[in-house]
């Protein structure tokens, strides 16, 4: 595990321990688990207009409120659940985002039936190495808020009834779930993430 003095991505420099753990242990590492992918899609939507640290610190409350982001369970939420969540001070109490998460669960259930898994669908949008920058520097990263793949993923999800899945949100999702490795070249975690990606079995 990197120590607190190790070089890291600029966005986490000087961050609190919980943010450092998220950067070191989660961000950029490839994920094939439908529940985790669905959770991140929902939380990225809740983050809109807020900082990721705010959402990260509420993540346990979100998990409790949204049935650990089990797709089938959330898809079955009704008006009573919306009212319950609007009264939950531990999460972001935004009716539109809450209702979107429930609608997205229903869309995810349909997508899973079509494609076999949410993971199999999402990983179709992993870019080829030839489409990626040769080196990830801070300047390069600042200019990469979307990509051709995040635009396509956003468009496809919206066509299937998803909400709060714009291209910028989808690029952040791709970064966090390991569809791309956007750790800076000098980041102490980058090589470990590269190795993990090289060994990762893409879902089909």
Image: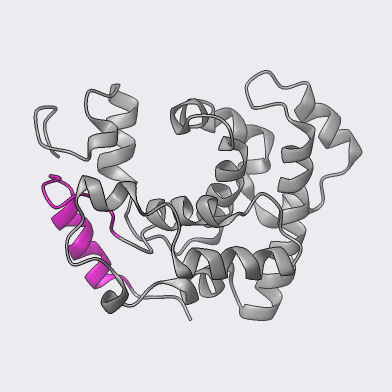
Which residue is most to the right?
79
Looking at the rendering, in which quadrant would you find the N terminus? top left
Q: In this view, does 25 lie to the left or right of 78?
A: left
Percent position (x, y) of residue 85?
76, 29
Q: Work out whether residue 35 or residue 151 is closer to the camera in this orientation and state it.
A: 151
Percent position (x, y) of residue 10?
23, 36
At x 28%, y 43%, the residue is: 25
Compared with 126, 97 (above or below) is above
Compared with 204, 106 (above or below) is above
Which residue is most to the top?
89
Q: Work out whether residue 169 or residue 176 is closer to the camera in this orientation and state it.
A: 169
Q: In this view, does 160 lie to the left or right of 15?
A: right
Q: Which colour scheme is used?
A: one colour
Q: What is the count of numbered marks?
A: 0
Compared with 104, 134 (above or below) is below
Magenta includes 185? Answer: yes
At x 73%, y 68%, the residue is: 160
Percent position (x, y) of residue 80?
89, 34
Compared with 201, 59 (above or below) is above
Magenta includes 78? Answer: no
At x 46%, y 69%, the residue is: 148
Percent position (x, y) of residue 111?
68, 71
Task: Answer with the quarter of the image where residue 155 lies.
Answer: bottom right
First to last magenta residue range: 181-200
At x 73%, y 69%, the residue is: 159
Q: Is residue 132 left or right of residue 56?
A: left
């Amino acid at each position: 595990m990197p120590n607190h003095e190790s070089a890291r991505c600029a966005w986490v420099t000087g961050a609190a321990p919980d943010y450092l753990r998220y950067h070191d242990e989660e961000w950029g590492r490839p994920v094939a688990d439908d529940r985790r992918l669905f959770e991140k899609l929902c939380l990225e939507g809740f983050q809109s207009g807020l900082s990721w640290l705010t959402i990260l610190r509420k993540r346990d409350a979100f998990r409790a409120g949204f049935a650990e982001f089990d797709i089938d369970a959330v898809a079955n939420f009704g008006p009573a659940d919306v009212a319950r969540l609007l009264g939950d001070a531990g999460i972001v109490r935004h009716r539109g985002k809450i209702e979107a998460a429930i609608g997205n669960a229903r869309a995810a259930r349909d997508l899973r039936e079509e494609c076999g898994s949410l993971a199999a669908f999402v990983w179709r949008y992993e870019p080829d190495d030839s489409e990626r920058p040769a080196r990830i520097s801070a300047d390069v990263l600042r200019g990469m808020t979307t990509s051709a793949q995040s635009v396509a993923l956003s468009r496809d999800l919206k066509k299937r009834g998803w909400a709060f899945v714009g291209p910028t949100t989808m690029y952040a999702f791709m970064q966090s779930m390991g569809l791309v490795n956007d750790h800076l070249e000098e980041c102490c975690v980058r090589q470990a993430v590269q190795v993990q990606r090289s060994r990762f079995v893409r879902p089909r």
